Amino acid sequence: MSKELGKIQNETFEKIIFNNCGSSRKEVSVGSAFGVDVSVVDLPNGLALASTSDPLSLIPSLGLEESAWLSVHLMANDMATTGFAPMYGQMVLNLPASFSREDFKIYWEYIHRFCKDIGVAITGGHTGFVEGQNSTISGGGTFSTIAPKQDILVSSNAKLKDVILVTKQCALSSTSILGMSFPEIIKNKLGKEVHEEACRNFYQTSSLKDALTAAGTEKKHTDVTAMHDVTEGGVLGAIYELAKASGNGAQIYNELLPIGDVQKQICDLFHIDPRYSIGAGSMIITCKKGSEQNVIARLKKEDIDCTVAGEITDIKEGIKLMEDGVNYDLPYPSEDPYWKAFFEAFNAGWK
């Protein structure tokens, strides 16, 4: 079998993980599943515990503050798909032995600050320094929240004829990280303005506000049926995952996918298809047909762009992408193009 980079494919997930998840417990109402961002465990009095886990980032080319931001907000984005903010966090840090204690202090203070900003209490974890640890992944974390079970959304809730919405733009996080990691090449090839906007976009990589605005906070909106955050595989990969998780098909319209000018320029320079590239900060939202303009209006009030991109269809119709008048079967991306582009640029000495 060929080596897989990034998240594992659905086939591997089903063969190795899906039927090997430890003991079966009746209170687990949503467990491990492809395309589902959270687990849900039933609690007394109509409540439930939602949990999600993700790697923690430590990327020298970005910096300690930016790495901490990604560590916190990529987990928060997953939890946001429930329609609720995270409440509790556990952190496991396996740090490089060469990582100075002073840098660790700075990094952890940013983790603390960003968690505090979104209301997360860090309740424990593990921290250690490891010889030979040179990855940009510094460990992993888990966020959890407690909420009324009936109000918790999961990506498998999408229904036939729902409208598919996308917030912000494709490839938001990948182009921001590339812009910040290779500033000289971006400035020389694309101009100072493109570089500056890519850097500004970095702090748009949280989709927590998108999700809470769409779903409602004090009062839940019943027109939103499901959400799924955009990570590896980009907007198209995320829509594919949501359709699979909900047991449906999807019809996607290529000309409606939101691709900003800065994202297009950077993706062209690095030979990346922005539709399939890491897009943290964007959220896939499904809503009842006829209510899409209401959801878009709610987001617009908060200055969040939102675009209709397609609809949920019958599973028999498959997952389709209409491009230049032709309807194609949409393949699931085997590998996000960002990873290859980043390491090719790094190995070529781009600065």
Image: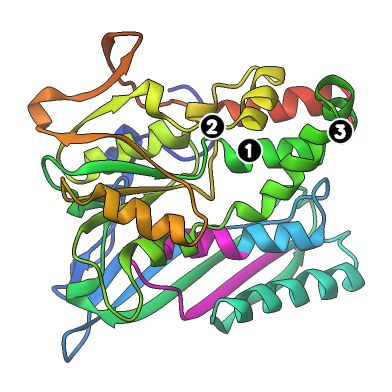
Q: Which one is in front, 336 or 229?
A: 229
Q: Which residues are magenta?
A: 72-94
Which residue position is annotated with label 2?
A: 277
Q: Quadrant of the N terminus?
A: top left
What SS does tag 1 mark? Answer: helix
Q: Quadrant of the C terminus?
A: top right
Side (left or right) of 335 relative to 198 = left
**Is any atom of residue 40 visible in this view?**
yes
Q: Are marks 1 and 3 in contact (CB under 8 Å)?
A: no
Identity, as a three-letter code, of the amino acid under mark 2:
Ser
Disc 2 crowd, CA 10 A, few/some/many (<14, 14-19, 20+): many
Sooner in the amino-acid sequence: mark 3 or mark 2 = 3
Question: Looking at the rendered structure, which numbered label has been put on residue 340?
Answer: none
Which residue position is annotated with label 1?
A: 174
Does the magenta segment cover residue 90?
yes
Sooner in the amino-acid sequence: mark 1 or mark 2 = 1
What SS does tag 2 mark? Answer: loop
Real-space CA distance between mark 1 and mark 2, rounded to the nearest whole angstrom:
7 Å
| Rendered image quadrant of residue 32 | bottom left
Residue visible at 69% across and 72% down in the picture: 111
Instruction: State whether residue 8 is above or below residue 143.
Output: above
Identity, as a three-letter code, of the amino acid under mark 1:
Ser
Side (left or right) of 340 relative to 50 = right
Q: Are marks 1 and 2 in contact (CB under 8 Å)?
A: yes
| Rendered image quadrant of residue 187 | top right
Looking at the picture, how far across and down is residue 203, in whole percent? Answer: 67, 55
Looking at the picture, how far across and down is residue 195, in whole percent? Answer: 80, 36
Looking at the picture, how far across and down is residue 87, in whole percent? Answer: 46, 81
